[in-house]
Amino acid sequence: QVQLVESGGGLVQAGGSLRLTCAASGRTFSSYAMGWFRQAPGKEREFVAAIIWSGRVTNYADSVKGRFTISRDNAKNTVSLQMNSLKPEDTAVYYCAARGGGYSATLSTQYDYWGQGTQVTVSS
């Protein structure tokens, strides 16, 4: 069982930055791949970024590539999403997710545990 708690969301102007952090409970954090997803009002939940168990491999949605960076600290049981050059279309609730087996995926159905989400609002 893994419990996930996101923090760091808020209101920012376009072009600004935010850093989201997800804190995980449990002693087996390093065995999970971690992902970030987002959901805007009236839209489906979409993949943002993911990182494998070791942190050595990451992947990103095309819409955030070059602007967002995912990282993890297995000693602290945390995964972070650094978001730069934010755009109004990045406005959404951002969710942290954990996937057993250690290797990342881009479909939300492939993740086992989810946080409650944190709101990110980017004003124009």
Image (cartoon, grey):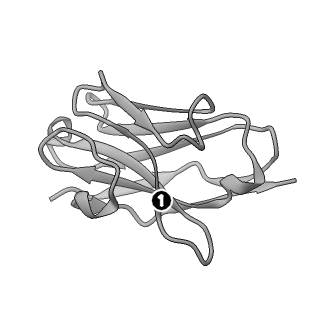
Q: Position of residue 84 (x, y in %)?
A: 68, 34
Q: Is residue 74 left or right of residue 46?
A: left
Q: Is residue 79 left or right of residue 55?
A: right
Question: Dot 1: within a 10 Å radius of its alpha carbon, few (fewer than 14), some, or many (20 or more) residues?
Answer: some
- Identify the residue shown where x is 58% and y is 48%: 8
- Residue 116: which quarter of the image? bottom left
- Identify the residue shown where x is 50% and y is 70%: 44
The residue furthest right is: 124
Q: Secondary structure at mark 1?
A: strand
**What residue type is disc 1 on?**
Glu
- Pointer 1: what residue? 46
Q: Position of residue 79 (x, y in %)?
A: 39, 38
Above or below: residue 32 compared with residue 115: above
Q: Is residue 107 left or right of residue 26?
A: right
- Residue 74: which quarter of the image? top left
Q: Position of residue 58 (x, y in %)?
A: 37, 30
Q: Position of residue 1 (x, y in %)?
A: 14, 59
Above or below: residue 68 compared with residue 36: above
Q: Is residue 42 left or right of residue 123?
A: left
Viewer-nearest residue: 86 or 30: 86
Number of callouts in the render? 1
